[in-house]
Amino acid sequence: MNEPTSALSSAAASPASSNRMLLDWAKELQALAQTGLVYNHDSFDRERYERIRDIAIDMLAMQSDMPAERIRGLISAGYPTPKLDTRAAIFDADGRILLTHENSGEWSLPGGWVDEDQSVRSNTIKEVKEETGLNVTADQLIAVHDCANHNGLSFPYGVIKFFVQCTRIDGQFEPNIETTEIRYFAEDQLPQLSTTRNTAEQIAMCFTAHRDPDWATLFE
């Protein structure tokens, strides 16, 4: 009985904490309902799981700027798993890191969602080509991050981010629908970052990995 009381007291004390807690509960309810729909074949139980899922999706919609139907399309398929995102760390001869200028006006490592038919490696290479025009090799996995622990996301689903060290082969930038510019930056001269894509700490991690020939992949 003490644990729920403590949780409620914490939520009441902090609106931000309350919102995060409600989001986490809604995500958990949705995952439990979705798992039940995958593995349970009793028609009455399925009706209950579908209703729980509907309520959870409505709760998620209230906590984000996505309409309920879009959320349903993103997460209501099979066993619930996080979405995957890849980010490429590309360095020039001076040890500067390549960032892309997003339409939002912020900067990020090239990358994006892992497509259905792609591996982490191939998706990293594909996203770099699409956003920067560069051809690269994907050489080393720097880190695997749970974005809930690093990027403060409020998405209605989990996100796992893969940071991959890459080497530029050739190519040149071409304007596209996602990025307006690419530029190399020194570690102490970073621009305004899109923190949902990558934080200053994550960029610093990439610099450290680049300088360390014995770097071991981080799992956080």
Image (cartoon, rainbow, N blue to C red):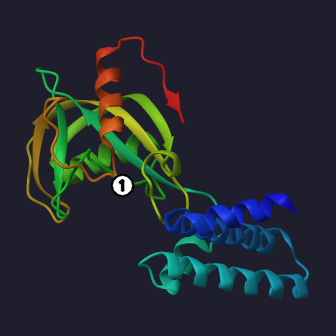
Q: Is residue 172 above or below residue 197?
A: above
Q: Is residue 159 shown above or below 52?
A: above
Left or right for 28, reference 194: right
Q: Give whichever of 142, 148 is nearer the camera.
A: 148
Give the residue drawn at x 56%, y 76%.
60
Give the image location of residue 144, x and y in percent.
Answer: 49, 38
Classify 31 as above or below 123: below
Left or right: 119 in relation to 43: left
Q: Which element carries disc 1, helix, strand or loop?
A: loop
Residue position for label 1: 196
Q: Quadrant of the C terminus?
A: top right
- At horizontal 49% and vertical 41% (from top left) the residue drawn is 145
Quadrant that contains the N terminus = bottom right
The spot of residue 216 in percent (x, y) is: 48, 19
The residue depicted at 30 percent of the width and 39 percent of the height is: 200
Q: Dot 1 surroundings within 10 Å: few (below 14), some, or many (20 or more)?
A: few
Q: Amino acid at mark 1?
A: Thr
Q: Pick the residue in front: 153 or 114.
A: 153
